Amino acid sequence: MAVKKLNSMRFLEQQKIPYEVFEYDDSRHSANEVAELIGVSAHEVFKTLVVMPEDAGSKKPLLVLLSAPQSLDLKKLARATGYKKVRMAAHDEAEKLTGLKVGGISSLALTHKNWSVYIDQQATQFTHIYMSAGQRGINLRVPVADFITALKVTAIDCAEGSGN
């Protein structure tokens, strides 16, 4: 059965970025489970987190991509992005802000929002990474360099236990 074309796929095609589609059981939401289901290393599957700046006047969320086994270091993220303090959006808040279900949130499906997108610098060691297509049950394999360029993504050190 053919996968319906999602906005994330249309965006990649408009940018002339090659991608591969991977479907899996959409009841699985964790990036670690997705890695297992599609048969790749969890370090290559990136989850998209919605993070809220706590600074006065800052209402636009940040999108942060981390590999499945990593945890976000909020203090490192705040320092790297120039905010005094940031917090994770709650699941219902993330879904309301993005219009996407947790487990299917994707920066590729949210390009029209013009939110700042960050990716942990460890992603740059890979040629390709896997990320949600913007719908639970569908991941895309995309070239890291092309993804970073097309979305103007900033690579930063934001994972717990990495770097300084």
Image (spheres, helix red, strand yellow):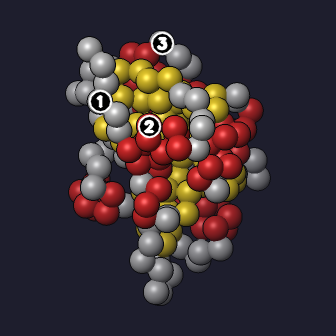
Q: x%, y% of residue 141?
A: 53, 27
Q: CA distance from mark 2 to mark 3?
A: 21 Å
The reply, left or right, for residue 90 in relation to residue 121 is: left
Q: Mark 3 = which residue? A: 39
Q: Residue at x 54, y 28 (%)?
A: 19
**Label 2 Cα neighbours within 10 Å, binned few <14 / some 14-19 / many ≥20:** many
State the separation of the CA atoms marked 3 and 1: 22 Å
Residue 93: image x %, image y %?
Answer: 28, 62
- Is residue 48 something that shows in the picture? no
Q: Is residue 16 above or below residue 37?
A: below
Viewed as shown, does residue 10 lie left or right of 26? right
Q: Which mark is residue 4?
A: 1
Q: Quadrant of the N terminus?
A: top left
Residue at numbered disc 2: 9
- Mark 2 or mark 3: which comes first in sequence? 2
Q: Amino acid at mark 3?
A: Gly
Q: Is residue 102 left or right of residue 163?
A: left
10 versus 76 height, above or below: above
Secondary structure type for disc 3: loop
- SS at mark 2? helix
Residue 12 screen position, x and y as percent: 52, 40
- Which residue is more in the foreground, 29 or 129? 129
Determine crowd level at label 1: few under 14, some 14-19, many 20+ residues with C-alpha closer than 10 A. few
Q: What is the distance, in whole Å, between disc 2 and disc 1 at their CAs?
A: 10 Å
The quadrant where residue 80 appears: bottom right
Residue sitting nearer the eye, 83 or 113: 113
Number of the front mark, 3 or 1: 1
Instruction: Give the residue type at disc 1.
Output: Lys
